[in-house]
Image: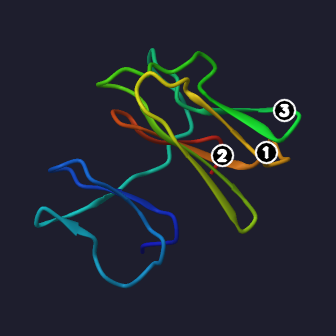
Amino acid sequence: MTELLDVYKCEKCGNVAKIAHAGDGQLVCCGVPMVKMEEKTADVGKEKHVPVLEKTETGIRVKVGGVPHPMEEKHYIEWVEVRKGRKLYVHKLKPGDAPEAVFPVDDVNAKTRIYCNIHGLWTNRK
């Protein structure tokens, strides 16, 4: 079942869609059903993806992994997202940017997700 803010990817062209309003239909791209991205929470391998939150004077800083994630043309974090109550904050990143973002949220336990163009969707908690 599709729910608000679920993330889907087209395995054919790479399009990524985030659900803003859940309906009963099936998401299709390039003539094939899109695949729901599962949120991963445990890092394995060289690159680290699990969001790490730290308090700042104005809110929180979200860093991608305990060791900074690569931000190269072919491998980078596309966006960082923080959810707190009914508010959603999204910070888009591009190759060359630092793999982090600052948000005006006063909660180091806020649900946070990041999207890596190679390794998919990651969160700090389910």
Q: Position of residue 16 (x, y in %)?
A: 33, 54
Secondary-structure class at tag 1: loop
Instruction: Find out whether the residues at labels 1 and 2 contact each other: C-beta distance under 8 Å.
Output: yes
Callout in the foreground (3, 1): 3
Front position among marks 2 and 3: 3
Q: Secondary structure at mark 3?
A: loop
40 over 47 or under it: above or below? below
Q: Indicate the position of residue 34 as horizontal and vertical percent values.
A: 25, 61
Q: Amino acid at mark 1?
A: Asn
Please report contact status of discs 3 and 1: CB closer than 8 Å, yes or no: no
Question: Which mark, by number, is residue 97?
Answer: none
**Type of residue at label 3?**
Thr
Whichever of callouts 2 and 3 sits on the residue coming sooner in the sequence is 3
Residue that mark 3 sits on? 56
Mark 2 highlights which residue?
125
Q: Nearer the viewer, residue 37 or 91?
A: 91
Label 1 vs label 2: CA separation? 9 Å
| Left/right of residue 12 with respect to residue 22 in the rendered view | left
**Label 1 Cα neighbours within 10 Å, binned few <14 / some 14-19 / many ≥20:** some
| Circle 2: residue type | Arg
Question: Where is mark 1, residue-wise?
Answer: 109
Q: Residue furthest right?
A: 57
Q: Position of residue 46 (x, y in %)?
A: 45, 14
Identity of the residue drawn at 85% across and 40% down: 58
In the image shown, does 114 or 24 lie closer to the viewer? 114
Above or below, 15 against 45 in this view is below
Q: Earlier in the sequence, mark 3 or mark 1?
A: 3
* In the depicted structure, whether residue 67 falls above or below residue 117: above
Quadrant of the rendered structure where residue 84 is?
bottom right
* Neighbours of disc 3 within 10 Å: few (<14), some (14-19), many (20+): some
Q: Give the distance between the C-alpha atoms of the residues marked 3 and 1, in whole angstroms.
A: 13 Å
